Amino acid sequence: MHVAYFTERPYRWVPEDVVIRNKAFFAVPNTYFDHVRGADDYNYYLDEYVYAEELGFDGVALNEHHGNPFCMGNVMNVEASILARITNRVKIILIGNPLPVIKHPLRMAEELATIDLISRGRLVTGWVRGAGSEQFFNNANPAYNREMFEEAHDFIIQAWTRPGPWRYEGKHFHYRHVNPWALPYQKPHPPMIIPGVLSPETVKWSAEHSYPYIGLGTSLGPTADLWDYYADTAAEMGYQAGPENFGYLIPTFVADTDEKAQELGKGFIYGGGQTVFSAPQYTLPPGYNSKDAIRRLSKQPGGSWLGVNRNKLMQAAIDDDAPIDYEQIRARAEGQLRKSQRNYLTLLGSPDTIIDKVKTMLTVLRPGTFVFFGPQGPVPNEDRLRNLELLAKYVMPEIKAYAEEIGLRSPFETPPGDLKLRTGEARGAVVDRSAVPTMEG
Amino acid sequence: MAVTVATREDVIQVGEVPVTVVRGGEGPPLVVFHDELGYPGWMTWNNELASRYELIIPQQPAYGKTPKVDWIRSYRDLGGFYARLMREQGWAGAPVIGFSAGAFAAAEIAAGCPSMFSKMVLVGPLGLRPTEGEIFDFLAVTIRTHVAATVSNVEAPEYGQMYGGEMTPIQFELFEDARAETARIGWEPFMFNDSLPHLLGGVGDLPTLLVRGSDDLIAPQGCITAYEAAVPNTTSVSIAGAGHRPEIEDLAAFLSAVNAFLGA
């Protein structure tokens, strides 16, 4: 199994009340950005990834968001380029580049090839559609999001593999002269991994391309359902999906004591946490979702997708002048954090406390890639580093041994899609629902 | 209120596209292009005008029963599509009323072929970069906020009929479809076309009535000023206290302006 470390690289200096008043991280005014602290953090996070390599993690994972102190990875490829040079062994995993948002697949092909070259073949490149708020920030038409995602992906593969020069006239992209001179180190191109929050369309697309799909902190039961959907699609494509096709990422904070982990783990709900990444009107811009997804949303007013449901979309504008009970909001968030731990959506505790929980996740979902999502909020550097150290020294050996015992092979050990099914042959199981613990509703 | 006019829906083939067209009334054709939220149903103002005209209201592709047309990627494309419909049905030369984004499409048609309309009524018109202010970014708010922003006079009798009550799943879906299509063809630049004013300068003496509610939150006064500057022969009417829906918010003032213009 491949074990990686990921952090959103949060900007840690925005007062929490500012985020709460804004009801979201997206659109917090950048007047709160301090360039000196920002410089310190960018450098620190790079050093943190280097430390993860030194401690023995197999990979370091980066992502990208825009206009949002929740994640300062605004131009992820720049950070990845630096890591390509200052690390030596780890895979550099991008989860992932928001293709429809960047709107320049030829440039993307060149940037990624450069990273792969500098790292001498350690790039694992992932693609995403970009969160709803990114469409606004980058003025990317949400109604063309999926079309542009697929066209950009197909173009990049061609740019990496088809001898140039050639001309490209697509629907959304047009290039007179495709002949990039930075081509990937890995042949035919870097491996891919597709992160997501259980959009069925993306799961299906990933399976059709034999790309590993990585669930971003999604609930065990629904994740198992989508793994099955992936495996069904894979079987239709003629292969047996296995651990190499699946990855899982989980918010984690480990400290020397459970008490300390619980206290600092509250960083995951700082300002409201991931559920207030962006306000509903920015999370689901018109046209961003498929018609089927909108239909599902319309019929499930209380249902939720990325913390958004029909009722929230029906809300009027935020009343900026309404009084806010900050303490009540924090207390509610703390309750949600406790519940998310009981439901295996967040791991907080000493190494001994979390090891069994991770093993349960591995048993149920059988992922070949497991990613620890590092602390959020204003957690001091020394506690962040201690978290990494404890994970590497005490948690990782245990879970790697367990993964070996139950046969969880990574996509770097078993190429996804290689295990072919004969015509008519039934596929094997990819999850173990019998191990799903009782969840709190 | 006059006796409710019987309406019917025709399906008219335009190339490969079956377009649903709502028709009602007697008299010469009066073409109506609905706004970005879609055809809201037959209202009192329709009824009143239907005593003198046959109202012809095509449902825009991707709205209601008319399927989405992939190659339509801008309001200029939409205008071209509507123009083909009008030519093929013999409606060329009819007067037109366009609402909001429907006015944008009408202006695009006029810019390309001024003789397509005998007169043009543009209500809360989008399509030109406002000389002052900004077109409200209704795609960056929730459906509820968007709908609420379109009406200033919430006491208008037909406001409740149009937007009142709990939104049903079907209404939610229709609104989302409408907003998705508006995003698809109007996202960037948002609901205007910088080449349009240059072409509108060539529409000659096409009589054009510009109608705007004084409290319109969607189309700022700068939209009207931009049309006044671009189109040679305009008359402007401001309806006091109305928002983006003057046809339901102040029916009398709206009909007075439109009847005076069309009858003149």
Image (cartoon, rainbow, N blue to C red):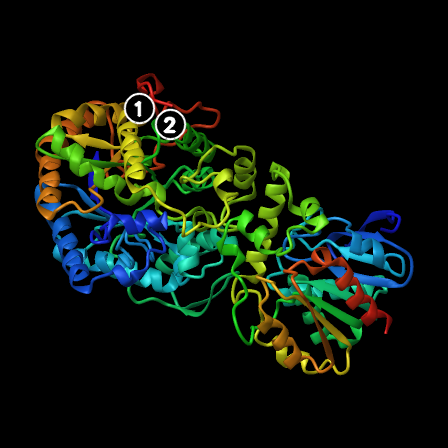
Note whether residue A23 is visible: yes
User: How many tags in the picture?
Assistant: 2
Q: Residue furthest right?
A: B27
The amino acid beneath tag 2 is Ala
Image marks 1 and 2: residues in contact by CB distance under 8 Å = yes
**Residue situated in front as seen by the camera: A126 or A294:** A294
Answer with the quarter of the image where residue A216 lies.
top left
Q: Chain of mark 2?
A: A
Element assignment for label 2: helix
Residue at image position (53%, 65%) is B190
Residue located beneath label 2 in the image: A224
Q: Position of residue A378 (x, y in %)?
A: 18, 47
The amino acid beneath tag 1 is Val
**Residue situated in front as seen by the camera: B160 or A162:** B160
Taking the image as shown, residue B171 lies to the left or right of residue A164, namely: right
Q: Quadrant of the N terminus of chain A?
A: top left
Find the distance from the CA under tag 1 to the CA under tag 2: 8 Å
Residue located beneath label 1 in the image: A364
**Residue situated in front as seen by the camera: A238 or A347:** A347
Answer with the quarter of the image where residue B171 lies.
top right
Element assignment for label 1: helix
Q: Residue furthest top?
A: A434
CA neighbours of label 2 inside 10 A, class few (<14), some (14 to 19), many (20+): many
Q: Position of residue A214 (x, y in %)?
A: 33, 39
Taking the image as shown, residue A269 lies to the left or right of residue A119, namely: right
